[in-house]
Amino acid sequence: MCCMCSSVSVCVFVRGFASVCERLAVCLSVCEPVCVCVPTMPLPAPDIPASQRLALDCRSLLDHRVGRERLQADSETRQASCSMYGVCGCCGALRPRYKRLVDNIFPEDPEVKANMEKLTFYALSAPEKLDRIGAYLSERLSRDVARHRYGYVCIAMEALDQLLMACHCQSINLFVESFLKMVRKLLEADKPNLQILGTNSFVKFANIEEDTPSYHRSYDFFVSRFSEMCHSSYEDPDIRTKIRMAGINGLQGVVRKTVNDDLQSNIWDPQHMDKIVPSLLFNLQSGEGTESRSPSPLQASEKEKESPAELTERCFRELLGRAAYGNIKNAVTPVLMHLDNHSLWEGKTFAVRCFKIIMYSIQSQHSHLVIQQLLGHLDANSKNSATVRAGIVEVLLEAAAIASSGSVGPTVLEVFNTLLRQLRLSVDYELTGSYDASGNIGTKIIKTHEERQLQEAVIRTIGSFANTLPTYQRSEVMLFIMGKIPVPGVHPTLTNAGSGGCEGTRMIQIMLLKSLVQVTTGFQTTNMLTALPNSFLEPLLSFSLMEDPEVRLLVLTILLSVIDRHDNTPKFSSISIISDISVLKLKVDKCSRQDNLFMKKHAQQLYRHIYLACKEQSSGPQHFETLYTLLALISMELANEEVVVDLIRLALALQELAQTNEESLSVYNRCAVHALSAAYLNLICQLTTVPTFCQHIHEVIEMRQKEVPFLLPEDIFIENPKLPASLEKLEGDVLFQQSKITEVLGGSGYNTDRLATLYIPQFTDEDRLSKRKSIGETISLQVEVESRNSPEKEERTPAEEITFETLKNAIVDSVGMEEQERERRRQVVEKFQKAPFEEIAAHCGARATLLQSKLNQIFEITIRPPPSPSGTISSGYGQTQSRSVPVYEMKFPDLCVY
């Protein structure tokens, strides 16, 4: 009899396999519960008795045929009673060993850990049993969760964790399925502790590198569940923080497990990224007060590392660091959408922090992809409020500063085109007061100061992008921006008809010139010919003739940035008489061959525009200080002996301009021009180091300090200068004498002929941009300059006298010729539109035939018969004739043709 069974028990000692099986079948088929107990025996020796071998066979039979079906149907009482004695079934001694080992790790007191080493050793010894061990542990854990036996749940999860860490074999995949099933069971529970326990086990599993791939495993549930935990709103703040941190750790584990496994579902798919990234940003936003201080938060304190925000930042950095080229877009798009949905662009701080993390974390060669996405998002929000667009532009500014030199990527001009387009739209919005192109007032109120802030942000961003470019690309950007600046009478206005064309054009000019200032700031080049090509310099200088003083000042600032290659500009921030320029510690290099070529080509243009800029009535102290700096930089960066002579002539011409006052300048402007001339001559005399020249300049300056101090910069470029009533009595020692300067410099080897000639600017068609200069004045000066400077002056016939009637006839004739030319073009277009094809073909054919005949005539005249190798050719009648073959018909050997 079996002492543990409440009903009749039969203990059989078996002698034959057939009889035992028959009795066991009868015993198991009765309605009343029957327990067949077979004594537990030690491990069989090599010579196994027949009774022990039969018992082992019966145990295996019961395990496969009866155990899984009948044991689940047994009553709860019998299972509990039998498990106390290590049987856990109706036939404990006949159960497989792995089940008995699993049962042995669950003691009566869950606080006592026991027998785990035996189970681990068995799993390592018999790895083919891992899947069954996992299934059985899963079955027990499910039952314990349902019965709220959380102590046994912890034991089961610890056992699963230890088996995962210890076993690395091909059969681990089936064991992992049981493990993930149990983790899912815990995550679905409503107890926070179980969710955290399941997450911790999943994180341990994620750190294991599996030897064999899995084709059927899915992590979709875990992505969704961990994302949900990141948004936990549990009442207790401490528990809520733990749940959120568990969710963040779980997402990090999912990323680690799937990101490098090609057989898994792509974690970079939008369906996953749209859950992962917003969950991370939600927790990152809670720590918005702590600014990201470095590319990686390794210096954070232990307390900060435990906060969800710091943990999120580490997880976010790891996610982005694993992103390949094709995955950047899917990772960044949810960030943009999150910032849009929660109106986080306007605050700027959080948006900037997010993209700092992104730019520091991704691979540097992928930086331009983030920049392009931001630019596209800026275009998509072109009709949004100015604060939103300004926030995106600020993020672009920070991103460009962080990125490497390849941040702009292959589409350099497209980046600047997008920014310039936003600049233009902002100006249009400011002038029209509406985001609607039709001019209707929209629902949004456009605030002028917000649009101005946006424009300044765009200009700063353009400069930030330009600073990342090499010199040759920056030159291309300068040309590109210059081509966008509207010129009155040449380019149409960029604003709408209702936005005030002139004002809109002026604003666009100023904004684009400010952009050029940003691009040229810090510009370094060794070759001025490439830095200031004709296509850039001529339109730039043309803006220096405009009436708007702000435009002229921006043009001068751009010239300073390009010409200054040794950072000398700050040393001339204010115009003054410097007795010893050595205190400035100027950096002066010898003029290179390329610089000499540049000055030969463009020097007269620069002198002319400096001279004309001094004639402008609207010029203020800033203009004269900038002109002084420009003259000083030309003297140090681009000067040779010829340039020095021309600059001295220019300074004396400015003195003459202020003295004669042909342009009816104000008293202040005349004094300012005198002061500019004096300050520059004081500088150039010390650069030339000719003692007698310096002596003359210093004598004049000393005389001015005594008698006419208002002709010196210290007394004129101040807030309230003391101006005289007039400047009619200036003569003698207070003026610089050209004859004296020519004499002293001639003794040092300078060109006296050139020095003795007063500088007169050459006027060109650019003067049409200055509204005060008439056509008649321009033509008269051109004729006068030509007649004066021509070497064949004596041999030329006297210039025709230009009168009002002559100008009138010239204008009328030019208008009539333009009308004739326009009519001729119209007739040609009409003919090609309406004439039949045969007529057009015949006309073109006739022209081609005529051209060919003329070419043949030219070839016959110019080509002489080449010498024949045989000298002459004999005709059939014994006569000789020259061999004449045109060059273009001669057959040359292949080796002679290239």
Image: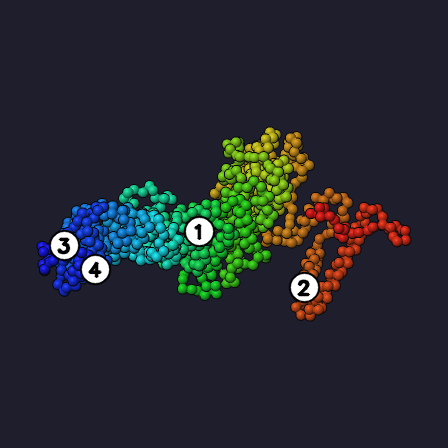
The answer to which of marks 1 and 3 sits earlier in the sequence is: 3
Q: Nearer the viewer, residue 424 or 197?
A: 197
Please give left or right for residue 525 compared with residue 77 in the image. right
- The N terminus appears in which quarter of the rendering? bottom left
Q: CA distance from mark 2 to mark 1?
A: 54 Å
Residue type highlighted by circle 2: Arg
Give the distance between the C-alpha atoms of the residues marked 1 and 3, in whole angstroms.
73 Å
Which residue bears the numbered disc 1? 325
Q: Earlier in the sequence, mark 2 or mark 1?
A: 1
Mark 2 vs 3: CB contact within 8 A: no
Q: Position of residue 627 (x, y in %)?
A: 55, 43
Marks 4 and 1 sit apart, C-alpha to C-alpha, by: 57 Å
Measure the alpha-carbon separation of dots 4 and 2. Answer: 104 Å
Q: Which residue is mark 2?
A: 825
Closer to the camera: disc 2 or disc 1? 1
Q: Is residue 757 left or right of residue 186?
A: right
Is 873 left or right of 606, judged from the image as shown? right
* Of pointers 4 and 2, the one earlier in the residue sequence: 4
Viewer-proximal residue, 178 or 456?
178
Badge 4 element: helix
Q: Is residue 92 visible?
A: no
Can residue 405 be seen from the camera position used here?
A: yes
Residue carrying label 4:
66
